[in-house]
Image (cartoon, rainbow, N blue to C red):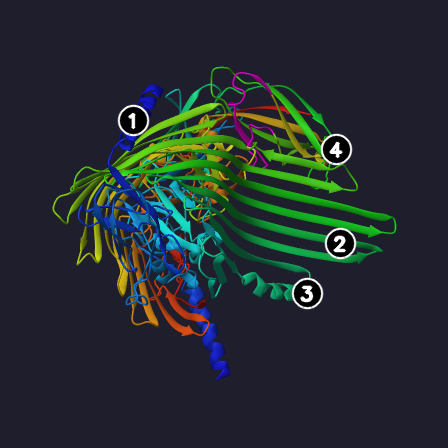
Amino acid sequence: MQNFKKHLLIALTLVIIIGCEIVVDIDMPPYSPQIVANCFFNPDSIWSAHISNSLASLDNGNIKDIESAVVLVFENNIAIDTLQHTSFGTYRSLGNKKPSAGKSYSLTVSADGYEAIYASDIIPQAVQITSASIQDSAGTDENNNIIAEVSINFNDPTGQENFYELELYQNYITDNNKIWFTSLDPSIEQDFNGESALFNDVLFNGKSYQLKINFDSYYAQGSSKIIVYLKSVSKPYYLYNKTVILHQQNQNNPFAEPVQVYNNIENGLGIFAGFSVDTIGL
Amino acid sequence: MIKCIFGIFVCLFWLLVSFTSTAQKFTVSGYLEDAESGEKLIGAHIYETRLLKGTTTNLYGFYSLTFPSDTINLTFSYIGYQTFTKQIILDKDFRINISLSSSIELEAVEIVGERLDPIEERSQMSVIEIPVAQVKLIPALLGEVDVLKALQLLPGVQSGGEGSSGLYVRGGGPDQNLILLDGAPVYNVSHLFGFFSVFNADAIKNIQLTKGGFPARYGGRLSSVLEINMKEGNMKKITGEGSIGLIASRLTIEGPIKKDKTSFIVSGRRTYIDLLIRPLIKAASQGAGVGGYYFYDINAKVNHIFSDKDRIYFSVYAGDDRFFAKASDSWLNSGTTYESNIEFNLGWGNITSALRWNHIINSKLFSNVAVTYSKYKFYVNAINENIEKSSSGTTKESYNLKHFSGVRDWSGKIDFDFLPSPDHYIKFGASGIYHTFNTGAIQFKIESTNFTTLDTTLGIEPINAGEFALYFEDDIRFNARLKANLGVHLSGFLVNEQFYYSLQPRLSLRYFLTDEWAVKGSYAIMNQYIHLLSNSGIDLPTDLWVPTTDVVKPQRSQQVAAGVARSIFDNKYELSIEAYYKTMNNLIEYSAGANFLDVNADWQQKIEVGKGWSYGAELFIQKKSGKTTGWLGYTLSWSNRQFENLNFGKSYPYKYDRRHDVSIVISHKINENIDLSATWVYGTGNAITLPIARYLTNNLSNSFYWREIQYYGEKNSFRMRAYHRLDFGINFHKKKKWGERTWSIGVYNMYNRKNPYFLYFGNDNTGNRALKQVSLFPFLPSVSYGFKF
């Protein structure tokens, strides 16, 4: 009898817990898989794009690379290259062509069974770092570690909206290793992910600006060099990267409003965005 | 504009003067009260039987009637009380205070405490009163009687999600309700993330909700005004009541301090889950840790009658929710003692208080002066302390992180009721509020014996703002068929040297088509100078109250409503059908993905501004007296939003857009000892955003890291399953030598409907991708023991 009661209690508890979660049917609109293009381009790299497909959210299949697509690149509306499939959905310029800053580019991708896609963007001119300095010991962080500080100066171009991304590397012999950093600069949002900071020129449009970032002074010691990357990025690049981060942060919170990732591919999904870089070693 | 406003007030003043100069009329005035407790009766009906003209008592139980010199027959009536009739030879002004006794023959079986002024008589529309006695009969989650959950059962009022105590009135947001406890605004009405609300029904006398057709005396919020008045306290003898429930217990004591002069009421409620689990946590952590959660409410009120003309009331409410955890540890290593203490507190709470003074200036003019204080605070406090003790000395380091936000109001107001004749009920007054908004700050402090103290506060400075309002309204009886409430409300707001003002005309009309059927119409403009920033679908205390600023404009709404009303079946039932259309401008929402902890960015940079509109129809049939009471409510409604930077600028359904909403509430008294009650609710599922596709993408920071991205369709284009639920309750009363005891047994979600709380994508039993729904409350029985003495 005691056992029976115990089992009954366990069963009841289980019913209540399991009973709280059920699979529900919701009418999803019909969705045909689309071409997904991922292509970031800059004057220092050969043209390269990744082409795959999308699936309906309840589709049990695996997302696949599309290996037989026709991928065309246009410069100022003139076709300049057909990218060729190399491996795992990656298409490259076999003629080792690179884009140039200040020009506009577009991409078309067609593949059997999918609607052809189109996207376009520009490469902004790289904003030059006019000067930079490093201070090996600039206080301590919350764990009482000594922090180093890098200050960089640049002139924001007048009369236009500019978008930037800042990254920091430690150059050790031949490798560049990414350094995580923090910043109290008002342009940089406090919840940025620490590996790259996206910001715009709303607070300093057309002015020369100094930006300070902090990182563990361990990286500044010894013979290794600190390299600052200041990327001048296009608006689609900025919007895409910002929304991707927010999308990830809110994805598993059922109470948060979902964040739609920025998409600039017509008839498809993904991103086609340009940027250019200026670097300085310290 | 200023000239125009000035002109209106001059006209209104002359109107006033012209009334006062009327000759050869006399006035009967006074208070109506319960004979047994001395509690003033709100909304009681006083009627002259020959002239067929009457009035109702105001919020303080005061009435005034002016007639030409004659013999008059007045009846004083209130549901559940014996009607009292008095003949007066009206040759001078009379002050008559009346005590009404409970109807003896009906005493045990009726719900008392409701006005007798029939629905079709009133010029106002979209106003609902629920007797507190009825609220107490409605079966409640875990037996905790809940005023706001009862209001959610009314047509035009939606509940948000499962367990939420938020009110969504006619498509508006939860911040658009002016919730007044004895005239003081209450900013956060939820305990435990909305599962319970802050009002303790034992201390409440009167609940009135206005959803539209707002009279000019109300302002400052777009969607509703909920007036809750606390009991004053028994003037005759000490009485008490209380209950012991599954999650909380409560106790109320009231009585005279000086009989018929001064009385008090004190009421308290506290949950005790923490007291029960504290020993368990302590045992599990071998005494090193304690933690828990509790909430409490305290209501207290005193009132004193100075003279027949003067009375003061002082009421206080305080309530808090608190999570806490503490742990300490110490160990010895190589002769050094290490000690570590961690403490975490998270809490939120309101304090409100109101000091009010009623003064009868003359038999036709009643005044009330009030000073109120209201504060809402949310805080997180984390402390981490490390101590090292060795022969070489003691070192100590402590880290302290505090986050706090909130709002504080000081307000003063003066209101006048002027009753020049039975055909006019004039109210006018002025108010001023001094707001202080703390929109979120983080304080980080490190103290150490090894290095210098660091004390940083991030976040923007508190914002101070002033709000004022002036109003004038007249409830005019033009003739037996036409009655109207006309008024104007002028409000202003001063913040950061920016001044906003708004002139809001208010109108509601009643016209008798036949002797029974009244048609009603109303129009109101409302302005709201405060906003609530919320980034989740549940009532979290982190929702941030922010003011209108030079960047963020005041919210503004316009509402038109039309309807019919009548009493049916021997005046036992009230029927009303209303349709409304409402527009709302300058609504704010967080930008996609923004949240409250990002204090470095000013909240003004993280918001989107947009508009909303809603329309619908409501059917309400209510039975307020007799053995069986309750109501049927049905709402058919649409509510939409449009923001330039959300959903690509396209309009989308509001999250709580609810096409159909049904509620049935029935209470039945079988005999003196047993009563039953049941409620059934049905609502169209909440609108949600779901991904329609998924794809892979990478970013340049780490090109080897591919992640799956959800591609969402249009915002809120999907619907959760419909919500429905049946609750049931039964009360067994028994008279005891010391008073009365009641056993209450209830069941929440009788047929164990799995109502949606949230949805997510997962896998089903066969491993296929599936959309899963998580529900919160299954079949939940409850029991509580109540007592009255």
Residue bounds of the magenta highlight: A185-209
Residue count near mark 4 (Cα–Cα under 10 Å), binned few <14, some 14–19, many ≥20: few
Give the alpha-carbon distance from disc 4 to disc 2, as whole Å. 34 Å
Circle 4 residue? A221
Q: Between disc 1 and disc 2, whose residue precedes?
A: 1
Secondary structure of the residue carrying numbered label 1? helix
Residue B680: name its quadrant.
Answer: bottom left
Q: CA distance from mark 1 to mark 4?
A: 85 Å
Q: Are marks 1 and 2 on the same chain?
A: yes
Q: Nearer the viewer, residue B21 or B370?
A: B21
Instruction: Find out whether residue A201 is within the magenta segment.
Output: yes
Task: Characterize the local packing of mark 1: few (<14), some (14-19) or many (20 or more) Cα atoms within 10 angstroms.
Answer: few
Type of secondary structure dominating the magenta stretch: loop
Q: CA distance from mark 2 to mark 3?
A: 16 Å
Percent position of residue B104, x then y: 30, 66
Is B11 on the left-hand or right-hand side of A88?
Answer: left
Mark 1–mark 3 contact, CB under 8 Å?
no
Q: Amino acid at mark 1?
A: Trp
Q: Is residue A136 placed above or below B332 in the rendered structure?
A: above
Q: Does B726 sit above or below residue B212?
A: below
Type of amino acid under label 2: Glu
Q: Gap in Å between the C-alphas at discs 1 and 3?
A: 78 Å
Question: Would residue A68 be seen by someone viewing this image from the given angle?
Answer: no
Is B483 placed above or below A161 here?
below
- From the image, tell me which residue sits under label 3: B286
The answer to whether residue B274 is seen in the rendering is yes
The nearer-to-camera label among 1 and 4 is 1
